[in-house]
Image (spheres, rainbow, N blue to C red):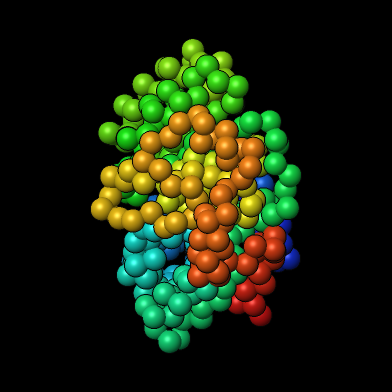
Amino acid sequence: MKKTFEAVDGHVDVPSAYLPLAPEARGCSDELREVEVDDVEAVDENVFDVDPDVVVRNNTFRAGEFRYEDEYPVVHVRHGASFGRDEVETTISRLEGAIDAALAPGTWWADRYREGFSDDTHVEVVGIPEADRLVEADAPEERHVLYAPTNHNYGGGSYLDTAEHVLDVFEDTDYRLRFRPHPMDRTEEPGRSVTERCRERIADLPNVVFDRNETPTESLLDSDVLLSDYSGIVTEWLHTDRPFVQFTTLAADAEVPKLGYQTRRLDVETVDELYENGLPEEVLRRQESFRAELGIPMDGRAGERVATEVAACTQ
């Protein structure tokens, strides 16, 4: 989740630092200053020791359980912006009464926030800070493909059904495939077993790499085509205007929003067509309609807007 804060922090003109909430979060960023604490679980005590003007959170971790929520302004900026899942409802149900401002990726999320949060919660559309670097970035144009579906256990994505099939499609082709499972599918079953089988196979595939980038931005910048489902990475990819395939074979009982070329099974001929010619016109029209509904400002200034909103709480 550090990617959100890293994309915003350079625009903040007041002293800032992140507070680790778990042992593995210590030292997780080379770009952000860290609050050094003895006990990461003593969240209230750690916040009161810092005595900040404002607390910014990009998660719903134990929301409503802390005393600091009543003492300091609390701003929420989303980590990711999945559209087809129930994350908005989860966010509202967990954060209601625990935040003072909700910064939304786009107008669709802002409308849901205004419906769900109380009237005294300030809602503002800011965009997706971690996607700012993607705006107007040149595609590599080197037949690079990124496979990055949402996680199985918590997102109900397509990973279990498509992971090994994707390797079949790209084996012995002239594409370079970057294979990027969701972090939870690297550590939790049943995704972990699939990941391990794929990782072993990838070791023998010279044109496939197992993506080890900590955050997805570099992987997105390095790709000509995206393969996903309704992962939050899709809304970041929209900033590139590059083609992508959406797998519709979800584990969840849900519908994939029509933002890309949709298929249940992939073949290399489809990838060839998308790489050479982009998305078909009917898909582009459908995508533009959905982009208008999402209302995400894609001007590369989301981090600036978040920083402005946060700084306003310190005045």
Residue 314 position within the rendered picture, expressed as x and y whole percent measured from the top left: 63, 76
* Image point (36%, 74%), residue name: 96
Residue 144 position within the rendered picture, expressed as x and y whole percent measured from the top left: 62, 32
Q: List the single residue furthest toward the top.
A: 204
* Image point (57%, 54%), residue name: 281
Q: Please, is residue 291 above or below residue 26 in the view?
A: below
Q: Please, is residue 195 above or below residue 280 in the view?
A: above
The answer to whether any part of residue 89 appears in the image is yes
Residue 12 position within the rendered picture, expressed as x and y whole percent measured from the top left: 70, 64
Q: List the single residue furthest toward the bottom.
A: 119
Q: Quadrant of residue 315?
A: bottom right
Q: Please, is residue 204 above or below residue 251 in the view?
A: above
The answer to whether any part of residue 51 appears in the image is no
* Image point (54%, 41%), residue name: 226
Front position in the image: 264 or 126: 264
* Image point (49%, 43%), residue name: 245
Task: Left or right? Give the position of 64 relative to 180.
Answer: left
Task: Left or right? Give the position of 8 relative to 158.
Answer: right
Residue 94 position within the rendered picture, expressed as x and y whole percent measured from the top left: 34, 67
Count of numbered circles in the view: 0
